[in-house]
Amino acid sequence: MSEWLEEIFICCYLLMFLFSLLGVAFLTLGERKILGLGGKRMGPYVVGLVGLLQPFTDLFKLFFKNFFLLGFVDLFF
């Protein structure tokens, strides 16, 4: 009797884990959509299929930004 009960608990834990991952994924897409409205960003549903390529485009944008420092700025306050 306890073997099938353990299997049910394992299935429940796996389902909870799966739904947690899906929830985080949808919250991330929603967050990206809201933040995309505020900046010069195309939004998660424009880049790639259902926004799957958006993190890679963000990474590409980060690496190729123009970082510069002014000569008269004190870096150590």
Image (cartoon, rainbow, N blue to C red):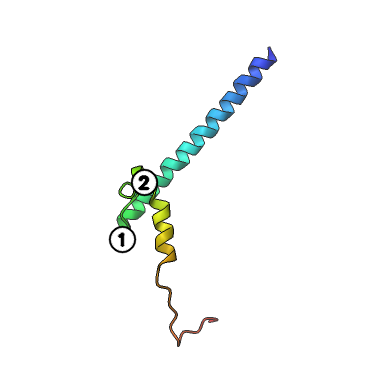
Quadrant where the N terminus is found in the figure: top right
Position of residue 51 measured from the top left corner of the image (x, y, whole percent): 36, 46
Residue 56's disc number? none
> 75 or 46: which is nearer to us?
46
**Looking at the image, which residue sits at the far bottom?**
72
At label 1, the amino acid type is Lys
Which mark's residue is nearer the viewer, 2 or 1?
2
User: Mark 2 and mark 1: span between their CA atoms?
Assistant: 16 Å
15 w.r.t. 31: above or below: above
Q: Which residue lies under the disc numbered 2?
A: 51
For numbered disc 2, what is the local secondary structure? helix
Name the spot of residue 71 as percent of width and height, x first: 45, 86
Residue found at x 63% / y 20% = 7
Task: Count every numbered label the image shows and give the total.
Answer: 2
41 or 63, which lies in front?
63
Instruction: Locate residue 13, reporting x and y percent.
Output: 58, 29
Q: Residue flagged by tag 2: what amino acid is it?
A: Gly
Q: Which residue is mark 1?
A: 40
Q: Residue sitting at 31 percent across and 61 percent down? A: 40
* Disc 1 crowd, CA 10 A, few/some/many (<14, 14-19, 20+): few
Q: Are marks 2 and 1 in contact (CB under 8 Å)?
A: no
Left or right: 14 as drawn, with respect to 51: right
Query: Is disc 1 placed on a helix, strand or loop?
Result: loop
Q: Quadrant of residue 30?
A: top left
Q: Residue at x 50, y 38 (%)?
A: 21
Nearest to N terminus: mark 2 or mark 1 = 1
Which image quarter: residue 29? top left
In the picture provided, is 47 more to the left or to the right than 62?
Answer: left
Name the residue: 46% across, 37% down. 22
Q: Is residue 36 above or below residue 11?
A: below
Q: Please say if 44 is above or below 69.
A: above
